[in-house]
Image (cartoon, helix red, strand yellow):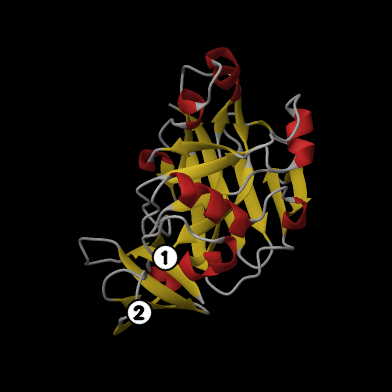
């Protein structure tokens, strides 16, 4: 099942829906419990796709592919390295990544993203699936020069528009063996598979929930494979994950 969040003409607020082919069955309320269809169906081309969630926080895992850790000049850490992107970084499919004037070297990073379904804390690995609503695509946009100069990652990862998510949440997906890629202007930059994750999606839910309480709609970014590189104004960045779809964003200077 594919869950979308859309802007509908004549409605003054975004709504969630279930995407079936080119039809969106609108829901009453949110998708984090029992689904409540409204009985209203709209054509996909008559609505605007938004980010599929507005999380309270986006929790990210650094250096979770060995090849990416190597290209960044390091090794996979003994314990997972996590950091947070604020909710104000989130944009949806076909929205614009805005390059800040403070950085001269902004990079793309395609990632499989986990969407949390229930408030949870200290989740066991074997029970992680019980608190996962589904999966979507993320681009962990990063000001690489600021990441290096600051010596930590908060500013580099936190500019507005630096976390494209979408286009929808896929609820029926095995995350363990998915091809993922990133293209810039139709040129492949990154190509990997989630079976190369050092720590699995379920392991990361367990680890992160041992640190902080996760809320419905929170998002976990699982890491990026090798091949990260710069994006500039005028580019189009396309992130694709097998079984989910494609997330595409234009790039512009502020």
User: Which residue does the image show at 70% across and 35% down from the upper left?
Assistant: 228
Residue 35, numbered label: 2
Q: Which residue corresponds to mark 1?
A: 117
User: Which residue does the image show at 76% across and 57% down from the upper left?
Assistant: 195
Q: Does residue 233 show up? A: no
Residue 241 in the image: x percent, y percent?
A: 66, 58
Q: Which of 59 and 119 is in front in this view?
A: 119
Q: In which quarter of the image is residue 237?
A: top right
Q: In which quarter of the image is residue 5?
A: bottom left
Residue 174 to residue 240: above or below:
below
Residue 110 to residue 43: above or below:
above
Mark sitting earlier along the chain (2/1): 2
Q: Nearer the viewer, residue 57 or 247?
A: 57
User: Which residue does the image show at 75% across and 26% down from the upper left?
Assistant: 74
Residue 50 in the image: x percent, y percent?
A: 40, 57
Q: Which of 47 and 79 is in front in this view?
A: 79
Please indicate whether residue 135 sits to the left or right of residue 5 in the image. Answer: right
User: Which residue does the image show at 60% across and 24% down from the upper left?
Assistant: 144
């Amino acid at each position: 099942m594919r869950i979308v969040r859309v802007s509908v003409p004549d409605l003054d607020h975004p709504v969630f829906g279930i995407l079936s082919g080119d039809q969106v069955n609108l829901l009453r309320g949110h998708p984090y419990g029992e689904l409540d269809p409204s009985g209203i169906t709209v054509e996909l081309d008559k609505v605007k796709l938004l980010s599929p969630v507005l999380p309270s926080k986006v929790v990210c895992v650094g250096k979770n592919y060995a090849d990416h850790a190597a290209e960044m000049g390091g090794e996979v850490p003994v314990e997972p390295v996590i950091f947070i992107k604020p909710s104000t970084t989130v944009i949806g499919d076909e929205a614009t990544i805005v390059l800040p004037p403070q950085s001269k070297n902004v990079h793309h990073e395609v990632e499989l993203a986990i969407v949390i379904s229930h408030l949870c804390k200290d989740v066991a690995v074997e029970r992680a699936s019980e608190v996962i609503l589904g999966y979507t695509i993320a681009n962990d946009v990063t000001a690489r020069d600021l990441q290096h100069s600051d010596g930590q990652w908060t500013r580099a990862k936190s500019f507005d528009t630096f976390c494209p998510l979408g286009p929808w949440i896929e609820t029926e997906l095995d995350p363990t063996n998915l091809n993922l890629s990133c293209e810039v202007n139709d040129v492949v930059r990154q190509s990997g598979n989630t079976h190369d994750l050092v720590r699995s999606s379920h392991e990361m839910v367990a680890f992160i929930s041992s640190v902080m309480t996760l809320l419905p709609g929170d998002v976990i970014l699982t890491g990026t494979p090798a091949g990260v590189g710069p994006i500039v104004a005028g580019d189009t960045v396309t992130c694709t994950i097998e079984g989910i779809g494609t997330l595409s964003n234009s790039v512009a200077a502020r």
